[in-house]
Every structure is written in structure tokens, then in C-alpha cells.
Image (cartoon, rainbow, N blue to C red):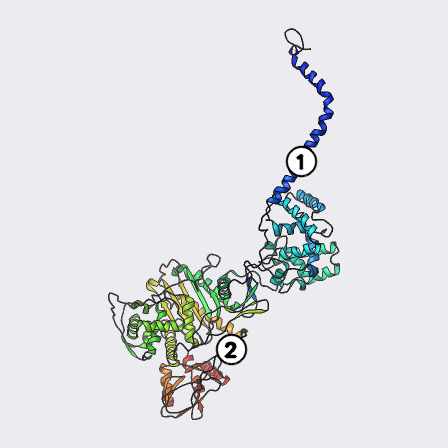
Amino acid sequence: MSAATKDNTGSPPPAPRLMRALHAIAAPLRFLFRPVVLALGLVIALGSAVALVAWCLLALPVDGGMAAQPGANASLVLETGTGDVFAARGTLRGDPIQADRLPQPLADAVVAIEDRRFRDHAGLDLRAVFRAGLRNATAGRTREGGSTITQQLARLQYLSAERTLLRKTQELLIALWLERQLSKDEILARYLSSAYFGAGAWGADAAARRYFGKAAGELTLAEAAMLAGLIRAPSQLAPTRNMEGARRRAELVLAAMVETGRASQGDADAARAKPAALQAPPEMAAGRGWFADWVEADVRRLLGPVPVDLAARTTLDPELQDLAERVVTDFLRREGDRARVGQAALVAMTHEGAVLAAVGGRDYADTQFNRVTQARRQPGSLFKLFVYGAALENGFNPDSPVVDRPVRIGTWEPQNFGGRFRGSTTLREAFAQSINTVAVQLSETVGRERVADVARRLGLRSELPAVPSVALGTAESTLLELTGTFASVAAGRRVDPHVVRAVRARDRALYTRSEPTGEPPLAPAVRQQLLSLLVGAVREGTGRTVRLQIPVAGKTGTTQEHRDAWFIAFTPDIVVGVWVGNDDNTPTNGVTGGELPARMWQAFVGEASRIRVAAPPAPQPAAAAAPPAPPAAPALRGRVSVLDTATLRVGGQVARLAGVIGFGGEYARDMAVYLAGREVSCTPAAERPGYHNCRAGDRDLAEVVLFNGGGRAEEDAPTVLLEAEHRARSIGRGIWAR
């Protein structure tokens, strides 16, 4: 023994002796304590397991999991005027899948790709877990999950997608419980009704309708394979955004179906030869977002909160929408910086107010603010439409003399563009050249309240302060409102711009637009005179930048310091409004309504006219009952005076020529010369109550007017009148002169 193990006396240390004594005493007790320790460990382990299960159950979310709740934000599918889907909003739910009516191709495809042993396991597939773990370890990352369909259903209906031990334990417990409570078909039906398939479609029926326009029970094998392939990565593989990826995944599903015996090789080959074709368009183009937002808001306003999937037939013309987006984008890109113009908006509608295209700004992705419907800006000289309309109603006519002179009302002195005064002129010339002092004098003469009344009748809803400057367009309004008032002039009746034709829930109609009825906002003679002023403003006035081979009637608008520039005008079949400016209301680089907006208008309308001539008319929803016909016009005979080329005074009675939109000025004077001293006979037009067919000798006056280019034919005019207009246009006669 070494010195290190002995004390100074050479005896062993006391501690080792004590330990040996204790071991000798404890040796007989070892076999007594071993079962106690094991039992204690077992109790602790079982207690921990019970505690974990209890905690998992107590921590279950009360409100369920990730699946969308039925009725809470129902979907809205948006269709163009011809019925093609162009957007979908909200959560599409479809019909629940029933266990006794499983769509077999889809059920087989989902089982083959998601859970091959679905029919054999009790909620947990240990083989799948082991296989997934092995493949993930080999790949060095998570590539495959081992969850069964039952576990996925548990997560969808009761849990979140959080990846924690707590959630996975809860998922397993619920899956085992579901397997004891439901049959396999019931589990599969619930899963197919709850799974997300991308593009806002929750559930297989919603996905079938969203992508293929049919119910889940009508799916082909190719379509079923594509839907089954979406479940693993619905947002990434949705065919509306990634058709190539969706088809590649469908190929894997078909291979899995053959491998598991759920499809024959021949059926799979046939499905590959004719892959699923999308019945819905690809993801909506960003530029249509303003239109889609507008439609969605209108549907919710019309119907309120409706907890069912809806489809809205809109007024959208996709070709014109694409054209409008292109025009706004191209002009702003080329000229925006030079002109110091940051934004622009364009809206196009029919004379009846059906909005065909709407672009609310430069880039929807950058800002969803809609400058067609939401931006309230000063209209400037556009407002003179209402001032001159009130003047014409109160005894003025286009040839009435007026004086362009300095005007002072209190401390306010309106100025003309360019700072000069022209002296004596006519109402027609003052409107064409947009003379401010004349507009203010007219407003003060007839009364601001009468001007406001005309604006209201034509459809302006904005507040109009009773101040002198309102005549020059200082009251703010929207591009949509203002364009709608021009449409009212074009149509001869009050027009309400609209984007929704009809709304349905499946095949049940919930809303169908009916045309409003009521008195015309302007008397026919006043309207014709106002039309002639608008034509003159484009032909010889501030809108003369526009050069088209069709009649154009419109008005420019420019506000103080060139902060806003407008051009709104209409042709025989379309009304278009354009605004340019800056969101922060900073001035542009001297832009006027007759410059950039007018050229944008011409670029759009020139191409739109060709598109609309080639396009078939859009189908209309079922119309409401027709309004009562006006009383029949009396037969008239005698010498006449000409109010305009479509409105005659015969023996103290007014006769309106059926099928003709007339003009005043030189055209009315020429017609008066033609009819001087001649007797005219007018009989009521059976096809147009309130109108007449008039003849001078053996000549039909409507045909004479149109053949000589003294007016234009209405859209629904008889063929003989349309042919007369065509002849005048082809040789450039009258209003068609080049």
C-alpha cells in the first residue's frame, strides 16, 4: 500500500471501512427496493403521458381550425358582358360532398396521392411516417409528410397549421377519435369538402366550379387528377396562375392511381392525351382590379350580406378594357414626366350608361384608389354644359349674341384663358372657345339655381355651392358622374352609369337591372341645340385636336393652374371621359383638356370604334316591364319653321322626326331654305310614339336630312335611314365633311 493511502500510524483510513460496513448491511435490501423504483418510474411515465394528453385536449382551440367558415365572406364570380369569367372575389364554398355520393374519380385520385392506405389504417399510418422520415433524411430537408387524410381533416377542422409537438399530438388524438366516430366515406367526404384547392376555392365542389365550370360529380379523370394534385400546394399550383405546374402534378397523380390500382393504364393514358382544360381565365390582369372592386362594392350595396356564392354579369367589354389600360399606360409612360402628370383615369360607357371599360389610375398594384369613382376634382369648363343647358332652356339659342367682357361680382373677377376679351360673339362661339366671362354672365342671368337644376336632372349628384364661381366648375365631382351627364345628353334621357347587369346564386336570379323611367331631362329642342354646341366645340373649338371620321360631341375642361385637365365626349355609340392630373393636386406642366386628355380620348375611341363595329352585341338580361308609351302624336300639316334638322314647328305644334338626331346652326338654316314656302305633312310614327314621319311632297324629310349630312341616324333607325347616313358619310357630306 502506498504512502498516499495510509495515515501516520500506518492504519487504513476510517471512511473506506465505514462504506464497507454500510454495503454489508444494505446488501440484503437490494431486491426489496428494485420493484419499488420500477413502479415509481412507471407511475411517473404514465402520469406524464396522461398529463400531456390532458394538456393537449385542454389546449384545443374552441373555434376550430383553418377551414373557411360557410357564409362568412361568400364568393363573388365576375363575368364580362358576354358571360366569360374574368375575376373571383371572396371564398368560394360550393356544395358539401356527400358520403353516399362521393365523386369517385376525385376520391380515388386523392387517396392515391395523399394516403394510399387510407382504407386500412386507424387514423395513423406508421409505414407512411417511417417512409416520409427516411426520404426527408435522405434529401436533407422536409420533402414529404406522413399525415393521413384523417389527420389532415383533424387539422383542417379543429387545429391550425402550426408545426409543434402539441399540435401534432392533438392532431393524432383527434384523428383516432374521428376514426371511431365516422366511416371512411364520411371522413373522405368531409375532407374533400374542407380542403383548400387554391384561387379562393374551399372544397372540391367549389374548385370544380372555379376551374372547370362544373360540379365535382361531373369531373373527368384528368380534371380529378389535377384537383387532387393541388391539395399539397394549392397556392403555388393553382392552374389559374401555374397551369404547367398543375399539369405536371396531375401526371404524378395519374401514375399513383395506376400504381395503386385505382385507375387502369389505358384510362390514365387517355387522361394524359387530353389533359384538363381551364374553363376560368388565368389570374385577373391587375388593371381590371379597379373594375372588379367597383363591381364587388355595387353587388354588396345592391344585395347586402348574402351568405351564398354569387355570380355577377357585368357590363365589362374585355377588349375595350385592355385597350383602355394600354392607352393610359402608354401615354403616361411617354408623356407623364414631361407634362408633370402623375395619374390619369378613363371610363367608357354606352349611351345607356353601361360601363364598358374603366381604368382608375397608372398602376393598380401600386394603389387601388379608383380615380374614376373616388377622386373628387374640380371639373373646370366641363361644367359649362349645365350653364349653357340652362341658358338654352331660358330663351337663348346657339346664335344668340353675347359679349365677352370683363365681369366683376363683388371682389371676384373671372379671367379668360389667355387673358383677353373678344367683345361681341355668339353663344355657339363662346361655348366652342370656352369663354369664362360669358359662362359667368349666363349663370348669373338665368340664375345659379337653374344651372344646378339642369345639372341634377342630367345626373350630377355632387354638392353645388351657390357661389358665382360654380359656373366655371369649382364644385368638385368625379369622372364617373361627369361622364354620366354627357351620356344623358347623348341618350336624351337620364342615365345612371352602372357596372352590374344581373346577379344570381347558381341558377336563381337575385337581381336584374331594369332601365329607369321618367321624363327626359331636357326638352328635345333644347337637347338638339346643346348637341350642336358640343359638336361645334370639337369641330372648331377647344376640342379640335380630335379628328375622327365619325361625329364627335364633347367638351374640354381645365382648372386653375392646370391642376386638372379633362376631355369628355361621345360618338354615335360610345361616351368616354378622360382625366389627367396629380393625386397631391400639384399643377401639371400647362396641360389643358384639349391636349393630353383629348389625344388619349382619340387614341382610345379611334380603336374602340373598330372593335365595336366588329363585335356582336352583348346579350342583355331579361328586361323589366316596358314603361307606358307616351300619348300618340297628332297628325300635322302646314308650313314649317325649323328649330333644328330633326325638330320642326308645324302650325304651332312641334314635330320630332323619328330616327334622326338633328343639328342646329348652318345645317338648320340650310334645311329652312329647302323647306321655305313648302307645305309639310307629318303623321305619327307608329314605331316611335311621340315622334313623326314628315314629308315635303314625295320626299321623306328624315331621309333628306341624313342623305345631306344634316344630322345622324339613331341607333335603332330603319335601314333606309341608316343607308342614307352611310351614303352621306362615304362622300363626306355635311357633318361628315373631312
Please give the count of numbered marks on the rendered protein.
2
Q: Nearer the viewer, residue 449 or 265?
A: 449
Q: Residue 256's mark?
A: none
Q: Quadrant of the N terminus?
A: top right
Where does label 1 land, which residue?
45
For this view, does 568 lie left or right of residue 500?
Answer: left
For this view, does 696 lie left or right of residue 318?
Answer: left
The disc labelled 1 sits on which kind of residue?
Ala
Q: Position of residue 514 (x, y in %)?
A: 50, 73
Nearer the observer, disc 1 or disc 2? Answer: 1
Picture quadrant where residue 71 is located = bottom right
Q: Position of residue 51 (x, y in %)?
A: 63, 39
| C-alpha distance separating marks 1 and 2 | 79 Å
- In the displayed structure, 528 sits above or below 369; it is below
Picture quadrant where residue 25 is located = top right
Q: Earlier in the sequence, mark 1 or mark 2?
A: 1
Q: Nearer the viewer, residue 636 or 142?
A: 636
Secondary structure of the residue carrying numbered label 2: loop
Where does label 2 land, which residue?
625
Secondary structure of the residue carrying numbered label 1: helix
Q: Position of residue 412 (x, y in %)?
A: 26, 66
The disc labelled 2 sits on which kind of residue?
Ala
